[in-house]
Image (tube, rainbow, N blue to C red):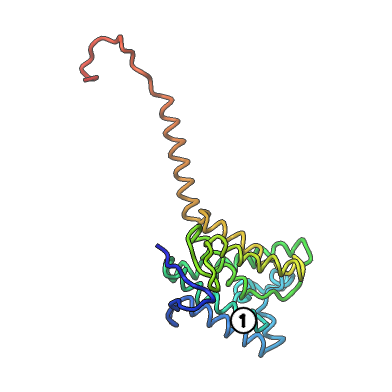
Amino acid sequence: MRPMRSYGGGGFGLPSVQSMAARLAIGLVAGSVVALALKTVGALLLLSPHKVFPGLMLWQPFTYAFVELDAFGIIFGAFALYSIGGGLEMSWGSRRLLWVLWGGTALAGVLTTVVGLFVPLPAGYTGGWVMGTMAWVAYGLSIGRGQTNFWGVPITGNVFAGIGAGFVVLNALRFGWVTQVPELFALGLIFLYVRGGSPRQLWLRVQHWRLQRQLRGRSRHLRVISPERPDDKYLN
């Protein structure tokens, strides 16, 4: 059973500073400070789709996840990773949290880079809030119709996930959809993962399908024994 937490209203237990959620939050703050301090050199940590493959800057889909360039993105992104990510870590474990949030953000960066090969995209995507959005939406979807608390208002997990997705939609309406390409990919990836699209679950479904197909194939060779057949000791 997943714990119900309260966000914005106080009164919830925070994860240990040694947890994976805390390390991701600290990594976001540290990476953002480095990027801001180094300016031009720090910009190499951001995701610029037109430079990843042609410029061999293959590290960018992995490093942009730990960079935000404005105070809101740094503080709110770190808060989401630390508190909401901590809730996920309690049910997922540290390793799974790392692979889903950081790995999912990196995959969203790779997909954005592929899109950039065909569609002009802006340079300098930050990914701290991409990772924070994945944590936010994943937590809400994992609760589903269960109850959580957001700023003192009781809501379902699905509504909580919808609020996280709403930030992306509002930013897209204000700044343009091309500015939110990694976030949009992240939303799709985390939805598929939480709602039954993880690699392990997909593999289990493939195995189930293969087993059902084999059983149907074998059933075609079976014959019904006629009730008028004389006594047979093998039928008793």
Q: Judge the density around disc 1: few (<14), some (14-19), many (≥20) Cα neighbours within 10 Å.
A: many
Q: Amino acid at mark 1?
A: Ile
Could you tell me how many numbered marks the image carries?
1
Residue most extreme to the front: 153
Q: Quadrant of residue 67?
A: bottom right
Observer-nearest of 1 and 217: 1
* Rendering coords of residue 201 (x, y %): 47, 53
- Residue under the point 69% across and 86% down: 41
**Which image quarter holds the N terminus?**
bottom left
Residue most extreme to the bottom: 37
- Residue under the point 43% across and 77% down: 13
* Rendering coords of residue 188 (x, y %): 61, 59
Observer-nearest of 120 and 24: 24
Residue most extreme to the right: 120
* Rendering coords of residue 82 (x, y %): 51, 77
Q: Is residue 226 left or right of residue 101?
A: left
- Residue under the point 62% across and 83% down: 32
Q: Quadrant of residue 208?
A: top left
Q: Residue under label 1, please give it.
A: 74
Observer-nearest of 32 and 55: 32
Establish if 58 lies above or below 214: below
Observer-nearest of 15 and 127: 15
Secondary structure at badge 1 equals: helix
Q: Is residue 187 left or right of residue 206?
A: right
Q: Is residue 125 left or right of residue 120?
A: left
Q: Is residue 2 left or right of residue 106?
A: left
**Which image quarter holds the C terminus?**
top left
* Rendering coords of residue 195 (x, y %): 52, 55
- Residue under the point 46% across and 40% down: 210
